[in-house]
Image (tube, rainbow, N blue to C red):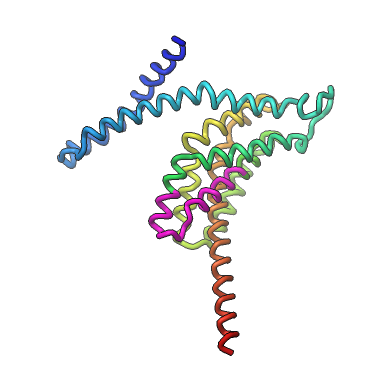
């Protein structure tokens, strides 16, 4: 019990050191540059305390739950005994790790849907676009992109193939999609890649990569364990741009059908 209390206390001190520079910059600009009193200063201080407590408990939860659980799941799913059905001396191929790919896709999708930063961006996008951009549809598109990206990243770790090749090909596809996508969706699509790599997704995905690289024979946790976050950043951009292109195509098709039916009625 005492160890748990000390862990929270140490995390609170560390979080306070990290957050205080942000507060100092904000208040410094407010009082020294703008030179005006902060409205509702008491509420802001209370909110700052809430942020400090929330981040502290979140970091403790990461260290004690999400990180160990992610590594344990990756280690168990990639265990040769599990994949070979208990047989000894079986040489595993890349396709034998299908449970790992499925788990990677599932964990990528679920953590992205629960990502607070993505929820905030999606709601703002729906509000500003007057409902033209659906918050639920945007979150689903981003989560699908992360799921595909993390699963492909797990495949890369298993096969030991080059990370830069995947990332370069991914960005080439993004550039091609950018030429055809509507200008209004491009900035949002690019931001979607950034908001996915945040508080919920990064710890679990990083733990998955490290656990997988530690278990697969011939892989190094340092060289192969990292890189899944890059996949989780690139593929949401691709999926959002693809979602926008598909929505635009469906809208044009529906409009064409409406015009065709109206012309037939007139004739």
Q: Is 81 covered by the magenta stretch? A: no
- Report the residue that reaches farthest toward the top: 2
Please tell me which residue lies in front, 102 or 179: 102
Residue for point 49% across, 62% down? 182
Residue 132 in picture, x, y percent from top left:
45, 61
Residue for point 57% across, 23% down? 68
Majority secondary structure in the magenta region = helix
Residue for point 35% across, 31% down? 51
Please tell me which residue lies in front, 107 or 226: 107
- Report the residue that reaches farthest toward the bottom: 267
Q: Would residue 150 be seen by someone viewing this image from the given angle?
A: yes
Residue 98: quadrant of the picture? top right
Q: Would residue 220 be seen by someone viewing this image from the given angle?
A: no
Compared to 222, does 40 lie above or below?
Answer: below
The quadrant the C terminus occupies is bottom right
Compared to 173, does 195 lie above or below?
Answer: above
Residue for point 56% across, 50% down? 171
Residue 195 in picture, x, y percent from top left:
46, 43
Residue 150: quadrant of the picture? top right
Residues in magenta?
122-147
Residue 174 in picture, x, y percent from top left:
56, 53
Compared to 129, does 194 lie above or below?
Answer: above
Please tell me which residue lies in front, 129 or 188: 129
Residue 82 located left or right of residue 32: right
Q: Is 139 covered by the magenta stretch? A: yes
Residue 183 located left or right of residue 208: left
Residue 14 in picture, x, y percent from top left:
38, 21
Please tell me which residue lies in front, 1 or 173: 1
């Amino acid at each position: 019990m005492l160890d748990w209390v000390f862990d929270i206390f140490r995390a609170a001190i560390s979080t306070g050191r990290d957050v205080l520079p942000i507060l100092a910059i904000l208040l410094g600009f407010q009082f020294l540059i703008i030179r005006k009193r902060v409205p509702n200063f008491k509420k802001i201080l209370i909110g700052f305390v809430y942020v400090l407590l929330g981040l502290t408990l979140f970091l403790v939860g990461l260290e004690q739950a999400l990180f160990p659980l992610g590594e344990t799941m990756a280690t168990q799913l990639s265990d040769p005994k599990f994949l070979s059905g208990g047989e000894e001396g079986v040489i595993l191929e890349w396709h034998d790790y299908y449970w790992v790919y499925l788990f990677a896709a599932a964990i990528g999708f679920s953590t992205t849907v629960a990502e607070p930063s993505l929820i905030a961006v999606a709601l703002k996008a729906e509000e500003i676009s007057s409902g033209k951009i659906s918050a639920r549809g945007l979150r689903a598109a981003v989560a699908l992109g992360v799921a595909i990206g993390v699963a492909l990243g797990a495949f890369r770790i298993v096969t030991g193939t080059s990370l830069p090749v995947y990332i370069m090909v991914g960005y080439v596809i993004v550039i091609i999609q950018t030429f055809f996508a509507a200008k209004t969706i491009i900035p949002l699509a690019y931001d979607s890649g950034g908001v996915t790599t945040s508080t919920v997704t990064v710890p679990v995905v990083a733990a998955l990569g490290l656990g997988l690289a530690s278990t697969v024979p011939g892989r190094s946790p340092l060289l192969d364990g990292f890189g899944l976050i890059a996949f989780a950043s690139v593929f949401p951009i691709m999926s959002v741009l693809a979602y926008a292109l598909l929505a635009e195509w469906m809208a044009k098709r529906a409009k064409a059908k409406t015009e065709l039916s109206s012309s037939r009625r007139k004739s």
